[in-house]
Image: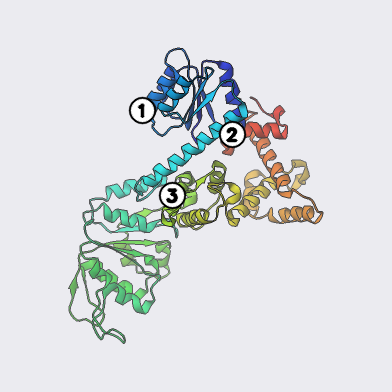
């Protein structure tokens, strides 16, 4: 979320509001005059603007007009110590979100700013919903490489092999290659060779003549004929039966094929794009895939990264899929809290982008509130969070608790220790506390986990809070609050 901007020539007002908003986990940026605000808008923008009405130079009303001309949807709260009708009317006529007379109750002021933030976020969701859906999303370097490759191949008819794990978006890449190619006006036909029984796949690909086999009562055009002049996408090509690979190779070689039961050769002009999650070189070595077909298909290879390799794209993809699910269901799109995004980014997503999309659909239906918090995430993600917490607690055990002679070097320990070594410890500790009738077990263990993480980060950064927060992936305000909560002030620098 973007910061709250406070504009007031009174330093004490700025200080009080800054501290109150920081306690509520908001990021704040302060200004003493309108000129500096307008200059800052060239490089940044606020989530909400809170401005005094009477300041040296341009007034709050002047600033309101100029800001609204640049950012029409931005909520602006006007403050003034002169509570007169003209000021209120001018503020609302200029498009102010609300009018805040001084002196104000700090709790009510923060609540008003929070309402303005909620309105701003709702406006962002509405604006996003009105934008056309993009073909693909990704800011990670690996995805930018894919986009550049699609651009380079846009005017080519060369055969492309797309590799990547299941759910990583291989068909989306194939559709993009088609859409931006000279064949864009032709058909795009997709077939999953692993989803069709072997006995039917030949007919699906090449068609059949009437009477070619029992049940073939009419002639049927296959996918190669349907894709003539366009693109044929062969998904999961590594699962194609070996005998059909020979027929596919012939089509790729000379563009000719026969329908099942047919005697007349047919010509087709098709660009083939293949995809697989398997290691085709290994399949060739094992004799399960023809080497000559592999080389025919593997002219240009595009590798799609797994979602865990592009975690920086998770926030953008999550918000996009929440918008998409809301459109499909005809409901208002959910928003997702930053803390929930952080938890999503720590999950490995074995099902990749498809799993994230399904998760967002689940959240749209099942999350109880309009803002998705970490506690609203499904059980498999919450379970992963508990596992990570237990691992951190186990690794944070005091050094003298380990037998000195048995302590391996750090690199050796990382290689030798099985990934789930902490699970029995977690089970024993949880069982001990629960069977003893303790309450608040979750909070107690979470507090230990968070405290140890912050101590470790502060030790690594020699007490520098901002650097520690960056390493941990949390906000500056969050680490400050936690340091105070756990009494770690002696370990940290301001």
Q: Nearer the viewer, residue 178 or 75?
A: 75
Q: Which residue is mark 2?
A: 25
**Which numbered circle lies on residue 69?**
1
Q: Residue furthest top?
A: 56
The secondary element bearing badge 1 is classed as: helix
Check disc 2: other Cα within 10 Å, few if <14, some if 14-19, many if 20+: some
Q: Does any portion of residue 466 appear in the rendered image?
A: no
The secondary element bearing badge 2 is classed as: loop
Q: Nearer the viewer, residue 296 or 222?
A: 222
Q: Is residue 283 left or right of residue 265?
A: right
Residues at marks 1 and 2 touching, judged by CB atoms closer than 8 Å: no
Percent of width and height locating residue 414: 63, 48
Percent of width and height locating residue 447: 70, 42
Q: Say above or below: 363 vs 251.
A: above
Q: Is residue 43 left or right of residue 391?
A: left
Check disc 1: other Cα within 10 Å, few if <14, some if 14-19, many if 20+: few
Colour scheme used in the picture? rainbow
Q: Say above or below: 81 vs 234.
A: above
Q: Which residue is mark 3?
A: 323
Looking at the rendering, in which quadrant would you find the C terminus?
Answer: top right
């Amino acid at each position: 979320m973007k910061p709250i901007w406070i504009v007031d020539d009174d330093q004490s007002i700025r200080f009080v509001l800054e501290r109150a908003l920081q306690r509520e986990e908001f990021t704040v940026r302060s200004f003493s005059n309108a000129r500096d605000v307008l200059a800052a808008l060239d490089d940044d923008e606020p989530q909400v603007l809170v401005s005094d009405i009477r300041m040296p130079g341009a007034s709050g009303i002047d600033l309101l007009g100029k800001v609204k001309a640049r950012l029409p949807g931005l909520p602006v709260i006007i403050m003034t110590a002169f509570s007169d009708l003209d000021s209120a009317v001018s503020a609302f006529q200029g498009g102010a979100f609300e009018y805040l007379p001084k002196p104000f109750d700090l709790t009510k002021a923060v609540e008003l700013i929070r309402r303005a933030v909620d309105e701003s976020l709702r406006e962002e969701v509405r604006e996003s919903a009105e934008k056309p859906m993009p073909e693909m999303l990704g800011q990670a370097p690996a995805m930018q490489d894919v986009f550049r490759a699609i651009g380079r191949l846009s005017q080519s008819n060369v055969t492309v092999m797309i590799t990547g794990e299941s759910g990583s978006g291989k068909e989306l890449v194939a559709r993009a290659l088609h859409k931006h190619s000279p064949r864009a006006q032709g058909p795009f036909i997709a077939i999953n060779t692993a989803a069709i029984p072997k006995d039917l796949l030949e007919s699906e690909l090449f068609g059949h003549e009437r009477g070619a086999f029992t049940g073939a009562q009419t002639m049927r055009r296959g996918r190669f004929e349907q894709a003539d002049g366009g693109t044929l996408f062969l998904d999961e090509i590594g699962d194609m039966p070996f005998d059909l690979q020979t027929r596919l190779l012939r089509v790729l070689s000379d563009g000719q094929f026969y329908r099942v039961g047919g005697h007349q050769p047919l010509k087709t002009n098709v660009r083939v794009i293949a995809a697989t999650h398997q290691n085709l070189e290994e399949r060739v070595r094992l004799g399960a895939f023809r080497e000559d077909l592999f080389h025919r298909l593997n002219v240009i290879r595009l590798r799609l990264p797994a979602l865990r390799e592009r975690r920086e794209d998770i926030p953008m993809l999550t918000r996009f899929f929440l918008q998409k699910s809301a459109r499909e269901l005809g409901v208002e799109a959910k928003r997702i809290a930053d803390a929930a995004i952080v938890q999503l980014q720590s999950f490995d997503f074995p099902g990749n982008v498809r799993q994230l999309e399904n998760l967002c659909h689940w959240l749209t239906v099942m999350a109880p509130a309009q803002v998705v918090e970490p506690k609203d995430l499904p059980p498999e993600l919450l379970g992963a969070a508990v596992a990570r917490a237990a691992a951190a607690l186990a690794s944070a055990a005091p050094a003298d608790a380990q037998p000195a002679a048995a302590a391996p070097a750090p690199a050796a320990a990382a290689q030798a220790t099985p990934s789930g070594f902490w699970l029995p410890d977690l089970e024993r500790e949880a069982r001990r506390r629960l069977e003893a009738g303790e309450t608040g077990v979750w909070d107690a263990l979470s507090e230990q986990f968070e405290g140890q993480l912050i101590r470790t980060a502060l030790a690594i950064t020699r007490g520098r809070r901002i650097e520690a927060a960056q390493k941990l992936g949390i906000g500056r305000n969050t680490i400050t609050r936690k340091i105070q909560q756990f009494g770690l002030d002696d370990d940290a620098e301001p």
